[in-house]
Image (cartoon, rainbow, N blue to C red):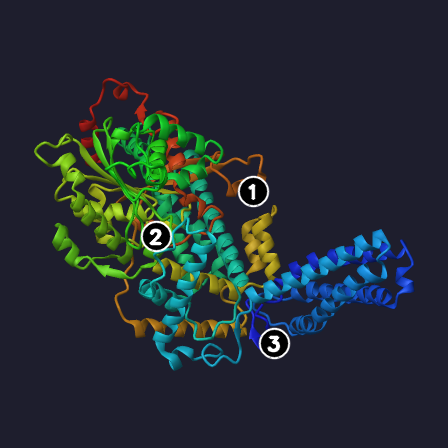
Amino acid sequence: MPSLKVMNRRWLFGGDELQVLSLAFIPVRVIQGLLSLLGTNSGSCYSDDPYASAWLWCSLAYWTICVVLDSALVHFGGMGTPTDPRVTVPNIVRFKTMVLFPACAALACLGIYSATVACGENALVRALVPLVVLSQLGELFSSACCLYAFRGRRLDDPHLGSIGQRRRLGTEYLDKKWEKRCRFFCKCSGFFTCFLFGGNDSGNGNDFSMVARVLSDYFEDDGSLDIVPSDVVAGMVCLRHVQKSEERRYRESRTLSAEVRENDRKTQEEVGRLQVQAFNDMDIEVGSGKADAEPTPRTQMFERQVTYWHRVANRKVLDHADASDRLVLDEAARFARHALAIYTWMLYIFMNPLSGVPKLCKVRCCTMKKGKGCGCCGGDGGSGNTNGDVCCDLHATALLAQANLDESELAYAHFGNSIVENPYCIIVDHRWKSVVLSIRGTLSLEDCITDALTESVELKSVGEKWGFDGDGEYAHTGILTSAEWIRADLEKHGTLRKLMKDDDAPYKDYMLRVTGHSLGAGCATFLGLMLRREYPDLRCLPYSPPGGLVTIKTAKAVSGFTTSFILNSDIVPRLSLATMELLRNDVLELISRIKVSKMAVLKSAVVGPGGVDRIDLIDDMLHPKDDVPDTEFRQQLQRFREVQRKVKEERGGVEVDLFPPGRIVHFVKTEERKGCCGGAGKFCGNRDRTYTPMWAENEDFQEIMISPSMALDHFPDRVCVCIERVAQEWGIEVVPGSNRAVFKSSSRERGGGESPQAHDALLNKV
């Protein structure tokens, strides 16, 4: 429902959310009343003292009124749809806030007096009454905290209270507001995490100017939209159901096509016609099935979904009998642990919460060089090949433990982190005859700021400097800047040159491989472009690369030396300004079409379809696209679209679509077995999941797919473990605790078989 407007404020919640709180408070009121009545049978203090008697009967009246009002909130809050206004709910909230809350405070004070003075000699009453009073005080405190957290903004605010704020105040004022919010959020996050995840370098307001501009434009509605956060959640749940229903239609069409090919031996043209017909029959989304003269946001969403699943239908699955496909997976499994290792001790402890500390102590004491210390322990502050490490070389120790490396294989590591300054390391992999440059992904608040610098920058000058074609091409500003910093730092200390290019370089015949995860994957892609002129046989291995990275020409151009790996529903390879705007528009459109209560929608996300076909479920929850009531929210949505159009015109600039880079291997979940956790297992690890690697196109990731695992599928440990497990299923042995992978086939046995040079040559041909 629209946000509550009570006490001259527009609160960040509606009456729907109060259903849950009211249902929770009703049994609490009953228990409070029973405890008070229990005390009446234990002595005569209630009848002897007027204050105690007044407290008892007033409390019973208070709890009775609260139960009645909470029941009314449950009833009226569950009526209507998320966009229907409710007159009764604000009145009930106003009465509870202005009358019952002060009464509760007065009763708590009276109860304290009754327990300590009037009934001071009765032990049971002295125990029960304070318990009831504490529950009343807890209710007041929790209610006050909730009201403060969701207080929203004042209705009489001359700056933010009505439509037309952008026109009156201009974009600069709103950008400053978002800049202050970002700075405040980073300071609070850093303080409450004891700066464990950074935050020391995020206080400069200039660092947030671009971030503030992006957020200001994305959320700008000029005061027209009246929604609350739970409405957005309900819209995303509906979008999840729509996407799953279309996925099911795709799978049914594939099954139908397989049966036709097997049983009837019809032609491929007939099979294609049947698949198209299966999609055209999806009347759940196209209403009557008649095409509109002008595409609406909803028909555009439907067309994108159909196009996406048609593209999936044409994907090629990697074949374990194909030598080139096996080599691709072999390489992915080998270097996934290198991309994971640079996350150092925090992720290592996260993956090994019980054994992590003892293992690090063992590596520190037994594997690393004797006599090495740190500044706080009286040592030399670390070895000469690391920079920015913490006490006891904890970062370097975890890096070696994670990848099962010897200290001699760590050529250089930089662990310093600030905005656009990213940790990275250089590792020598003797088995694969490779020098590996591994860049860390997003872990700190500074990295988040780098990620949020999403405005596109032209690559022409960068291409001219490093020898690639950047004319007319664009890229992610923050990630490109971070990659340029790493390239300059590599030139400064010269470790790569000393290892591979100098006259006395020990690894002249080794190949350079650049890898990373998330933010590090994007940096690895740009570093591949910058270093390829100097290292022509370079290979780039991005894991879970950002979706809003480069334009399509560059994304395709790097395919000759770049192979990206994406896990199932990972949101980051689908994340860009364009896809975020599509997600926002789709969610708002679906909110306007909901015809049931918000709680019914949210319940479907928790319990699932419950045996009901998803298509029937969507029919029950959503109005047909051509029969949506003309509500006030629909009018607000039209004004919002007009505001967004004007914002883009005012800002100007170039709007480009950005894509993940190179050839892409997509690990698609094809089977999921329920574990001991039941439905909750979808939020846990991937032990009971089967993944199938498929070749995907860069354009396949131009829409965010809503999934319970969309965030978890991006975790670097999950990506690494998944790829290693698929490699094991293919007959590639992955040594536990390391990433030293070899084929079980005779061509890759230890001590002989195909040489690393021939192996890399075949990969380059692929």
Q: Quadrant of residue 490?
A: top left
Please, which residue is most extreme toward the left here? 503
- Give the percent coordinates (x, y) of residue 21: 66, 60
Q: Residue furthest front?
A: 378
Q: In terms of secondary structure, where does tag 3 sit?
A: loop
Residue 149 in the image, given as x and y percentages of width and height: 55, 64
Q: Residues within 10 Å of mark 2 (few under 14, many from 20)?
A: many
Residue 700: x %, y % from top left: 34, 49
The crowd level at tag 3 (other Cα within 10 Å; few <14, some 14-19, many 20+) is: some
Q: Which residue is mark 3?
A: 7
Label 2 residue SS: helix
Determine which residue is flagged by label 2: 447
> At 37% from the left edge and 58% from the top edge, which residue is drawn?
579
Q: CA distance from mark 2 to mark 3?
A: 40 Å
Instruction: Name the residue tied to disc 1.
Output: 680
Where is residue 714 shown, x and y percent of the image? 40, 45
Between circles 1 and 3, the one closer to the viewer is 3
Return the residue nearer the eye: 740 or 187.
187
Q: Quadrant of the C terminus?
A: top left
Three-letter amino acid code at the position of disc 2: Asp
Q: Earlier in the sequence, mark 1 or mark 3?
A: 3
User: Mark 1 Cα within 10 Å, few/some/many (few <14, many 20+)?
Assistant: few
Which residue is more in the foreground, 576 or 345?
A: 345
Count of numbered tags? 3
Disc 1 to disc 3, C-alpha distance: 40 Å
Kindly tell me whether residue 301 is visible in this rendering.
Answer: yes
Which residue is at a point 53% across and 70% down the rendered structure image?
A: 152
- Tag 2 near tag 3, CB within 8 Å: no
In this view, 475 is above or below 397:
below
Q: Amino acid at mark 3?
A: Met
Q: Does residue 539 sit above or below 576 in this rendering?
A: above
| Residue 623 appears in the rendering | no
